[in-house]
Amino acid sequence: MSKLSIKNKELMTSGVVGVVLILSGAILLFLEENLFAVIVDCVLLLAMLFAVWIQRKDSEPFDEMTKENSDEAANKTAYLLHILLVVLAIYLLISRQTITLNGGSIMMFIGSIQLIKMAFFLYIDGKASVEGE
Amino acid sequence: MALYTKMKEYRTKLEISQEALANQVGVRRETIIRLERGQYNPSLKLAMDISKILGVTVEELFEFREE
């Protein structure tokens, strides 16, 4: 059986976790406590378990170049986040508005960051896969 | 300073595929591709592992030149 590529592993772990966090946050924010919300929660829990299972599967080595690409993606994400926070702070200062963070929005925020980092990593790492022998 | 390498030359001489070399040194094939294109500076350990498999010294394999 062929090994799982780093790209697929990243999509099926970080990607799934990011989407699950965003959806969980959305459920907390927008859905009332009913049977539908419980069913969606169960599906999300299964998706999370799938991500954990994929994490344990045999894959390509997370070698030194992959580590560097992952670090670069994390740096770019942090840079983007700082810019967003500065823009938001300036906007709030000018408009004299306040923001309230609750559990759901924090989960959506963390999920979005996770997806942005994954997108940066796939972009940076994908540049190497264009050419073969 | 740019990295130049003769990795591809030595590898093809020994008829080792990128995949096989990658497996032997424990990295991904993409890492070997970037190394051969001079787009990635390997760690000393990786450079030594590759040179050992290709039967040459690190200095013969990798070289930094002024651009």
Image (cartoon, coloured by chain):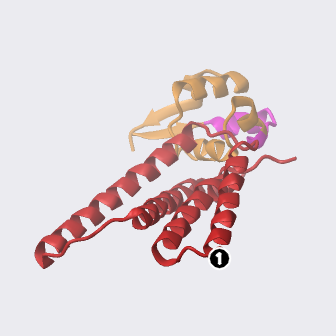
Q: Identify which residue, A7 or B3, lies in the foreground.
A: A7
Residue lying farthest to the front in this orientation: A34
For the stretch drawn in magenta, the main secondary structure is: helix
Give the color of chain A as drawn: red
Q: Residue at x 47, y 62 (%)?
A: A116
Give whichever of B60, A117 is nearer the camera.
A117
Question: Is A126 drawn above or below residue A54 in the view shown?
Answer: below
Q: Nearer the viewer, residue B9 or A47?
A: A47
- Colour of chain B in the image: orange
Q: Is residue A114 left or right of residue B23?
A: left
The residue sitting at 53% across, 58% down in the picture is A118
- Magenta-colored stretch includes residue B4: no
Q: Is residue B16 magenta?
A: yes
Residue A44 horizontal/vertical position (percent) = 64, 63
Image position of B10 with respect to A124: above or below = above
Question: Residue at 49% across / 59% down in the picture?
Answer: A120
Q: Which residue is mark 1?
A: A36
Q: Chain of mark 1?
A: A
Label 1 is placed on what type of residue?
Phe
Image location of residue A90, percent across then percent down: 16, 69
* Helix, strand or loop for disc 1: helix
Q: Does residue A26 appear left or right of residue B27 in this picture?
A: left
Q: Number of numbered discs present?
A: 1
Asked whether A12 or A24 is in front, the reply is A24
> Quadrant of residue A82 in the image?
bottom left
Q: Position of residue A27 (x, y in %)?
A: 53, 72
Region of the chain picked out in magenta, as a range: B6-19
Circle 1 Cα neighbour tier, 10 Å, few/some/many (<14 / 14–19 / ≥20): few
